[in-house]
């Protein structure tokens, strides 16, 4: 049985906003944390757009939408957001030092009962939780989403410290949210499915950077062949090209192999502010930076 009622989401960008929405949709009391008032307001707008989309699809009523949105609050202080949380879901950028420092702070401000969940694509929890107490480490696990507003894909990974009680609690919670997690039972960089996606992503970036393919042309062929609504370059735009670059760098730093180094051309896009959906342009242009075009694409 899911005992988690109060959920804190730390980092409320694209993924954090979607995760906050999904939890509130299923009756959880949610608090989103960002020191930036602008980020909190953008998250508020995004969750409203997600809720409007669900009303339009006939999945919830207007009354249910209003109740859902009332379950989401925001805080400018980590302690205010997480001080009474049953579960904290961390969604900050894919940078190890940043996550390490944050987990140390979370260990100090959260109650003993609180589970800590890193929403990370490529980093290992055993590297992230180094500033946590031994008892807190037992309450940690990792997840990786795709688009939690639009689909039910979720990977979950245990680490050497994850207790059996934490595994049961994590699975119960995410099943309550409508997911059936694919579990990677031993800690592995990139989980399982996501590790295969990373190999696809690396090859796509290599083909594009070396002039072999056009992103739109490649995505068209991919969607035709695999009967998918989203191509690899569209998905990278959704993830955020800065996040994609950081993920690829984490693999390169771990292996030291040149084949794992992200292409210079990707770094140039990031430095130019072309980050994908969240900035309005990436491999594609004209994104709605509040609502996100992939929602409309799914209709």
Image (spheres, grey):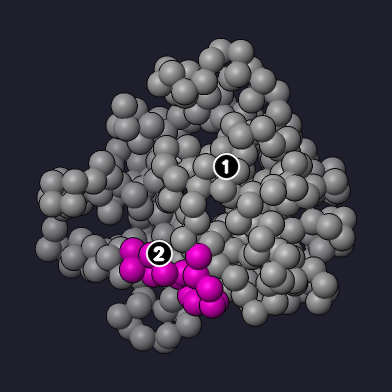
Q: Is residue 199 left or right of residue 121?
A: left
Q: Position of residue 126 (x, y in %)?
A: 64, 77
Q: Residue 213 at x, y = what percent? A: 13, 58
> Which one is nearer the viewer's eye here, 192 or 124?
192
Q: Does residue 14 appear anywhere in the picture? A: no
Q: Which mark, residue 233? A: none
Q: Which residue is mark 1?
A: 177
The residue at the point 41 percent across, 33 percent down is 292
Q: Is 166 located above or below residue 69 in the figure? A: below
Are circles 2 and 1 on residues that touch, CB within 8 Å?
no
On screen, residue 19 above or below 74: below
Looking at the image, residue 38 sits to the left or right of residue 298; the answer is right
Give the residue furthest to the front.
1
Mark 2 Cα shell of 10 Å, populated few (<14), some (14-19), many (≥20)? some
Q: Is residue 90 above or below residue 285?
A: below
Residue 241 inside the magenta-drawn segment: no
Circle 2 or circle 1, nearest the eye = 1
Residue pointed to by mark 2: 194
Q: Which residues are magenta?
A: 183-197
Residue 236 or 73: which is nearer the viewer?
A: 73
Which residue is found at the position 28% from the left and 54% from the top?
A: 232
């Amino acid at each position: 049985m899911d005992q988690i009622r109060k959920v804190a989401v730390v980092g409320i960008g694209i993924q954090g906003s979607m995760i906050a929405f999904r939890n509130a949709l299923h009756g959880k009391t949610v608090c989103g944390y960002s020191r930036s008032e602008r980020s909190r307001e953008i998250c508020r707008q995004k969750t409203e757009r997600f809720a409007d989309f669900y009303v339009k699809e006939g999945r919830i009523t207007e009354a249910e939408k209003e109740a859902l949105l009332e379950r989401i609050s925001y805080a400018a202080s980590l302690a205010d957001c997480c001080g009474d949380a049953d579960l904290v879901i961390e969604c900050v950028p894919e940078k190890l030092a940043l996550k390490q420092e944050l987990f140390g702070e979370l260990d100090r401000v959260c109650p003993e009962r609180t589970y800590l969940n890193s929403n990370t694509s490529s980093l290992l929890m055993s590297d992230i939780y180094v500033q946590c107490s031994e008892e807190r480490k037992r309450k940690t696990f990792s997840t990786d989403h795709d688009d939690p507003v639009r689909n039910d894909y979720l990977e979950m990974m245990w680490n050497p410290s994850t207790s059996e009680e934490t595994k049961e609690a994590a699975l119960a919670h995410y099943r309550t949210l409508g997911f059936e997690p694919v579990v990677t039972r031993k800690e592995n960089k990139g989980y399982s499915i996501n590790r295969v996606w990373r190999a696809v992503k690396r090859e796509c970036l290599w083909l594009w950077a070396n002039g072999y393919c056009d992103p739109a042309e490649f995505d068209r062929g991919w969607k035709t062949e695999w009967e998918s609504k989203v191509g690899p370059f569209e998905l990278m735009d959704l993830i955020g090209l800065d996040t994609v670059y950081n993920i690829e760098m984490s693999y390169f730093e771990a292996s030291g192999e040149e084949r794992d180094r992200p292409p210079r051309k990707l770094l140039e896009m990031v430095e130019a502010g072309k980050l994908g959906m969240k900035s309005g342009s990436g491999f594609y242009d004209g994104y709605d930076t509040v609502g996100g075009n992939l929602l409309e694409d799914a209709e």
